[in-house]
Image (cartoon, rainbow, N blue to C red):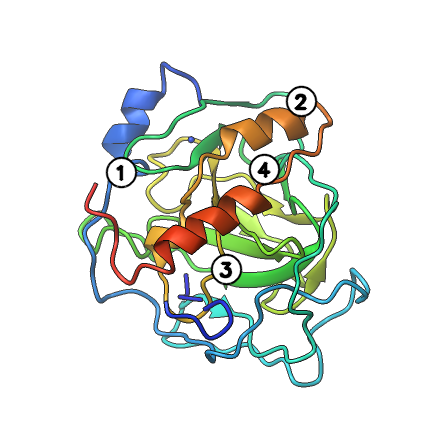
Amino acid sequence: MVPLTIGRRRAYALLLLAPVLAASGCGVPDAPTGAGPTALVSPTAVSSPTAGLSPTAGVSPTAVATTGAPGATSAAPDRPDQPATPRAGLPHVFPVRAKKVSYHPTHSAYPGTDIFADCGEPVVAVTDGTIGEVSRRDRYRKSGPQGPYNGGLSVSVIGDDGVRYYGSHLTEIAEGVDAGVRVRAGQQLGTVGRTGNANNVCHLHFGISPPCLGEDGWWIRRGVVWPAPYLDSWRKGGNRAPAAEVTEWHRKHGCPRKPPTR
């Protein structure tokens, strides 16, 4: 996973399974560590993607993903053509396309949701946007740093609504899903898995956060507002949008450079 900035500002679920996952570390607060990915993007990186691009379009001529150490998350580069104002009224869909799926409204230690489904079920983009970070290598080890690599294989979408939607523990990431690539709501990004610290339980960790490009880390990307109210809506075919709540959180907290103490 790679830290992201927004403008120039600095900046899981069945009740029976909850104890297992808490013990696994997916919902346990992690201590900060300097062992995370080293890839960075410029302070001028985008706050929201261009609305008019084709969903199958690749990276623009100036968009070249930046990657640090081997296995590090890639992040979308500068996109000077991006609009300053996020789009409103975008479609939102449930992030896992499966008949058998469950999740719990809360998550231990920090806002996020673990969505349980069989390994291999499709994980899709929640809304129209641009791929932000992609991690195609599972670097998590129990004996290693706890935090930076907990998600295993993961991908985020920077929605045209100005919100980052993050999914982790994937089995695989779809071909062509790379930083800077445009996607549409419902487009497959990968499949449900159990990589990272998923403790051998198939699920998607889903987090909602602001796209703090360049200054944040896993402690923001994993989620800062509770996804359950939005998931409830999307699962029923509704279109409740988290942009206002995420914007308010960002206004109050900025892009914290250290993990929360809780």
Disc 1 packing (10 Å; few <14; some 14–19; many ≥20) = many
Q: Is 183 situated left or right of 48 in this image?
A: right
**Lower position in the chain sequence, tag 1 or tag 2:** 1
Q: Is 249 situated left or right of 110 in this image?
A: right
Q: From this viewpoint, is residue 166 visible?
A: no
Q: CA distance from mark 3 to mark 1?
A: 24 Å
The one of 247 and 203 positioned closer to us in this rendering: 247
Would you identify the image quadrant in which residue 56 lies?
bottom right
Q: Callout 4: helix, strand or loop?
A: loop
Q: Which residue is mark 3?
A: 211
**Lower position in the chain sequence, tag 4 or tag 2:** 2
Q: Is 146 situated left or right of 44 in this image?
A: left
Write the residue at 61% across / 20% down. Answer: 100
Q: Which residue is mark 2?
A: 99
Disc 4 packing (10 Å; few <14; some 14–19; many ≥20) = some
Circle 1 or circle 4, nearest the eye: 1
Q: Which residue is mark 1?
A: 25
The one of 29 and 144 positioned closer to us in this rendering: 29
**Vertical placement of residue 212 versus 109, above or below:** below
Write the residue at 49% across / 78% down. Answer: 66
Quadrant, the N terminus: bottom left
Q: Callout 3: helix, strand or loop?
A: loop
Q: Which dot marks residue 236? A: none
* Amino acid type shown at disc 3: Pro
Q: Which residue is mark 4?
A: 120
Circle 2 or circle 3, nearest the eye: 3
Q: Callout 2: helix, strand or loop?
A: loop
Would you identify the image quadrant in which residue 251 lies?
bottom left
* Amino acid type shown at disc 2: Lys
Q: CA distance from mark 1 to mark 4?
A: 22 Å
Circle 3 or circle 1, nearest the eye: 3
Would you identify the image quadrant in which residue 175 lies?
bottom right
